[in-house]
Amino acid sequence: MEITITKTTAPRPKPEDPRKLGFGTVFTDHMFVMDYDGDQGWHDARIIPLEDLQLHPGAAVFHYGAEVFEGLKAYRTAGGSVQLFRPADNMQRMRDSAERIQLPDFDAEFMLKAMLKLVEIDQDWVPAVDGASLYVRPFEICTDVDLGLHTITHAKMVIILSPVGSYLGGGLRPVNIMIEDTDVRAVRGGTGYAKCGGNYAAANRAAAKAEKLGYEQVLWLDGVNRRYIEEVGGMNVMFKIGGKVVTPKLTGSVLPGITRRSCIQLLRDKGVEVEERLISVDELMDALAAGQVEEAWGCGTAAVISPIGSFAYQDKHYVVNNREIGPLAQDLYDTLTGIQWGKSDDPYGWIVKVPKN
Ligand SMILES: *Cc1c(COP(=O)(O)O)cnc(C)c1O
């Protein structure tokens, strides 16, 4: 399929100080759009000036939440080139997410090509400031105008781009975590492993509670027993306990993070033992009480590595590593960002270069 390209005649000014960029509030000049219907399949792939989407108010996405998305970043290297980190993994995960929601499948290679073209066209929007990058947000929605519940026959695929500062306002800063014991984010058999908007809607109430109580993130327990640790907000979670790294295994209700996958590989190649298994909140509390939790961190594209400074669970409260950044979290952060920003070699072939325009 050809991608038709219409460039804007009114380019907007780039952000003056990329250091002051927040997360996801400024957008570039162009977007990618493509439509699906049962007769034609995917068609009309186009890169056009950024504009509002026009949808009928009866479109099913507004009513029944049929939406999946991805998130990855384009980084500017010291030499001025632009590159993406493991983008094929994001496209494959988006296919898996779409399958769960029964949104139409798509050609991951074609979507990767479309994404590269869009970033190529808007590459001047990739900030050249340490820690800042261009966030790439592909998403797929159901556009059937139908309040009945039927198999999806119309959909739209969109990619938008947003220059972002460093997440959480700069560098590594340990965060305080509330372990949620009432609301759950996902259950096995549900949509936890899919990157879909509905999971985030389900998380809102606990996130609001945490914010009100002064915590930065929620740690989720499993939906059946409210006992096994799953994730921290929109990140996967890892603990260094007794010299080993332990992280929740992918049971179906945990999002299979690409940063998680990369961390596991980097750790094992550094000779650190990593266990992917069930970790109960009681095990964590006991290890915290015994002073055995050397480090804890969240990992995801947005923040890369987010060290955890403390955990609160019911009436218990524990500080980790004196609220300081641990050496392993720092090492992972340096290695990952080194590869992403092209400061170090890419021995794993994780980088995809964007052509210069
Ligand atoms: C996106 C996401 C992650 C992190 O995945 P990455 O591929 O590392 O960015 C973790 N948990 C949830 C719920 C997510 O949506």
Image (cartoon, rainbow, N blue to C red):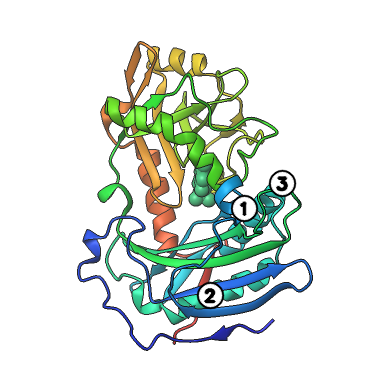
Secondary structure, mark 2, is helix
On screen, residue 347 above or below 186: below
Please, what is the three-letter code of the amino acid marked with disc 3? Leu
Identify the residue shown where x is 59% and y is 44%.
256
Please, what is the three-letter code of the amino acid marked with disc 2? Leu
Identify the residue shown where x is 56% and y is 72%.
33
Q: Which residue position is annotated with label 2?
A: 116
User: CB of mark 2 within 8 Å of CB of mark 3?
Assistant: no
Q: Which residue position is annotated with label 1?
A: 60
Query: Circle 3: is it few (<14), some (14-19), or many (20+) Cα within 10 Å?
Result: few
Please, what is the three-letter code of the amino acid marked with disc 1? Ala
Secondary structure, mark 3, is loop
Query: Circle 2: is it few (<14), some (14-19), or many (20+) Cα within 10 Å?
Result: many
Q: CA distance from mark 2 to mark 1?
A: 29 Å
Q: Which residue position is annotated with label 3?
A: 149
Q: Earlier in the sequence, mark 2 or mark 1?
A: 1
User: CB of mark 1 within 8 Å of CB of mark 3?
Assistant: no
Res 3 → quadrant: bottom right
Relative placement, left or right, of 233 versus 349 is: left
Identify the residue shown where x is 53% and y is 73%.
32
Depth check, front residue: 17 or 47: 47
Secondary structure, mark 1, is helix
Q: How many marks?
A: 3
